[in-house]
Structures are given as C-alpha cells and as structure tokens.
Image (cartoon, rainbow, N blue to C red):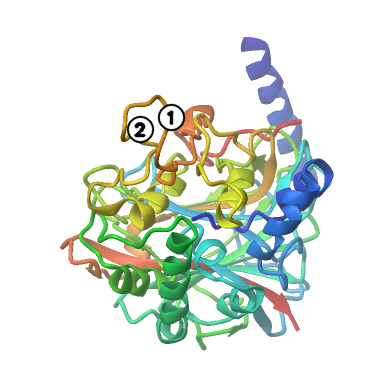
Amino acid sequence: MYSIKKTNLFIIGGLLSIGAVLMAADHLDAPAVMGTTADITDFYAFEGANQDNTVFVANVQSSLAPAGDSATFDENVLVEVNIDNDGDLVEDLIIQAIPRNGIMYFFGPYAPSQTGLNSVINEEAQYLGQVEISTGPAAITSSSNGISYFAGLREDPFFFDFTQFNAVIGGMAPNGFNNPGNDDFDGTNVLSIVIEVPNSFLGGTFSHPAGTGVEVFNTWVEAKRKQ
Amino acid sequence: MKFNNIKHIVASLFLTIGLVSCNNDDEGVGPVVPSIDFSGTFAQQDQMGRPGINTVLSGTSEIKNNFNVTIPSEQGATFQPLFLDQAVALHDAFGTTYETNILGLDAPTLTTILASDVLQVAPNAPTTYFDGTNVLTGRTLTDDVIDVSLILIFGGENGDRFNGQDLDNDGTPDLPILVTDGVSNAGETPLNVFPYLEVPHS
C-alpha cells in the first residue's frame, strides 16, 4: 500500500534500470500530478520533543536522487495542512506554506474563510511565520508564537521496496515480496516542510472513528496551484 | 563526527550572518512584508492523508487523478466501492479472497475506513500508525506504514496469512510474501529535535 506518490523515483530509477517492469507499473501513479512541483510524496504527524506540541511534516517532489540539491519549491504551489476538529471530514483549521524569493511563509493555524478545493491566503491570520529555505546540510529554523518552522532539502525518510511492490501488483511476482527487500528510497532526498505547533492552537478533538476511544483530530495535506 | 559538528556549526553561523544581512532575523516573524504578493486563488492538485491509499487502492489512472481532487467528505461515497473492487482484485491475482483482518474488519469496513483519506492524530496519546498497541493515532518518521498496510489488507485475522509459509515442509515456500516488503526502518535515524528529518544526501 504504498502510496506513495513517489513518482519521480519511479521515473528516474525505473525507466533507466528496469524499463519493462516499471512501464508495467507506471499506471500506479496519478498521471495528472506525477513528477510536478505539486506532487506530495508523504505526510507525517507526530508528537514533538515537547509533548505539548504536534509536528506536521509535508514532503514534496520526492526521490531527488542522489543529491537533488537543485530542486526548489514552486512559488505557485501552496502547501496546506488541513485539520478537522469534529470528525465531519471538513477542515476547521488550516496551516498554509508558500515560498517567496528563498523564504517560506506560513499562515495559521487559522479558520479558513472557505473550505474545499480552492483556497486563498489570509495575510492577517492570527499566527504568521517565515523561515529561510535550507539548501544544504545546515537546517535553518525559526520560531514565533511557540510555533517552529523549517523548509528545505532533507533526506527522504520513506523506506519501501517500490519496485517489488509494482511487480506484485502487476501480477509478475507470484512469490510476493523478497526477504530482504530493497529500499528504493535509500540515498534519496526530498523537499520538506516541518511545522511544530502547540496542541493548544490546534482546536478540539473527537472520539476515534475506529472506535478505540482515543481522542483525535483528522489531518491531511493538499498541494494547490495558483490559478 | 566532531569535525562534522564543527562544520555544521560554522555553516550555521555563516547562514545566520547571511540571514541578518538579508534583513530577516532568524526568529522569523513579524508582519509579512506588504509588498509580497500572496493574492489569488489556489486550486487543489494533490492530496494525502494516510500513506499509500491512492497508489494501492485506486485501480486506474482516472481513479487516481479523480481521488486527488476530491475533498475528504466526498471521498467515501465515490471511492469505497472502487477500493473494494481493487481489494478483491488484488486477492484474485493470487487466487485467493480477502479474510477479515487483524483488527476484525471485513473488506467493506476496511475500505470504508480507508476511502476517507485523512490521518487521525492523538494530541494526548502516543502517536503512531500502529505500534502493536496504539492504532492510527498519527504517523512518525520511522513507522513501517507499508507493512502495516499490507498486514491490514493481506494479513487475515492473525496478520501473517501470506508470509511465505512452507506448508508441506519441503523447503520451498507455498504461500507468497504479501504482509511485508522486507524493508525495515533500520536505515532511518531521524533527529530527536526539530526539524527531526536527517540532513540531505550530497
């Protein structure tokens, strides 16, 4: 189940090395967005080093192998973290990130004036931040109002035998996966946006829809292009 | 190791100086400069909640494209039946059928949950995709989300239904390996402080 929207790897690693297999697996990616600057590769949300905070990680343009240090965020692409506080699958709060001239600007969390497929940026949102985009090993970070910000090139934390997965899905691997498998994302980079937010800014919670009784909010990430 | 640390410190200083001279203090804040243009309408092109949903459970390119531009509140009605078809097809390919999984979910229930592609996050409980105890309370950088997903789809009630078993003890596996991709998180060593992700490969 891999989601992964790791299309670039597929293209670069695949077509070059194992053309036939990969061609068969090419249908696994969503063609409209694959390989573009709006291609989300992964989304993480976890408790921060400070237990009162939640960390959101949104990665785009995956598999920038091997170095991929020339990739840049697109000034026409807005990355938006959505938070649903009541379980109706509609965003109650958003956190937006968009680059301008080497700086990533952040807006929120705040309640959007409209929900759904189209977004605008409220420059008067309650929480605003910015950080210089990191292009090398040093991570340039900033913080304001208790929120921490990072944007830039990082090692892709994803690990997956995507090639064998495609073979399995494509009916070309009757024995399934290999033991051990091969991490196709080893040695690759990704453009990463990391935001650590005090939980007190993230709104309410509801009982887990799977019935576990744990209090949760829903979250998801979107990439939206300027029209 | 030490040398690397020193290099990083020097690099940080250098970057800090650069930042100051560029007029942004590195506490980063303040009102956004009015001359920067953030106007316009931004239309959705991609989206993601849980890992791997669209890649695995959408059976065609058209479904994948449509899923990415459907808001979560409308995903279930449209995509649950399609995801169920795909779950059946994935099993058909190995001459088998879905079996109620380790969480006690039958195929319609599992695909109903997965079709609304959002990630649940617990602000006041351990966050993990699945750690053996806590289920779907977040996703950390080292969670083996692939294996979890494979186990939920192919693992059956014990989670190990298709794991290369040698049923007749003839030394050759009789069942395929479908509950793990054989790749662990051993190579991932995220930092325990912000921004958590590792330095890029050069």
Q: Is residue B47 visible?
A: yes
Side (left or right) of B77 relative to B132 = right
**Seen in the image, is B50 located left or right of residue B69?**
left
* Residue that appears at 78% across and 37% down: A67
Q: Secondary structure at mark 1?
A: loop
Residue at horizontal 77 percent and vertical 66 percent from the top: A75
- Quadrant location of residue A97? bottom right
Rendered location of residue B125, percent (x, y): 24, 51
Quarter where residue A64 is shown: top right
Disc 2 target residue: B166
- Dot 1 or dot 2: first in sequence order is 2
Q: Amino acid at mark 2?
A: Asp
Foreground residue among A189 and B113 = B113
Q: Is residue A76 above or below residue B167?
A: below
Spot the residue most to the top. B2
Q: Residues within 10 Å of mark 1 (few under 14, many from 20)?
A: few
Position in image of residue B99 (x %, y %): 28, 60
Residue A207 x %, y %: 20, 69
Residue at screen point 51% across, 39% down: B196
Mark 2 closeness class: few <14, some 14–19, many ≥20 residues within 10 Å: few
| Residues tagged 1 and 2 counted as in contact (Cβ below 8 A) | yes
Residue behind mark 1 = B172
Q: Amino acid at mark 1?
A: Thr
Observer-nearest residue: B133 or B125? B133
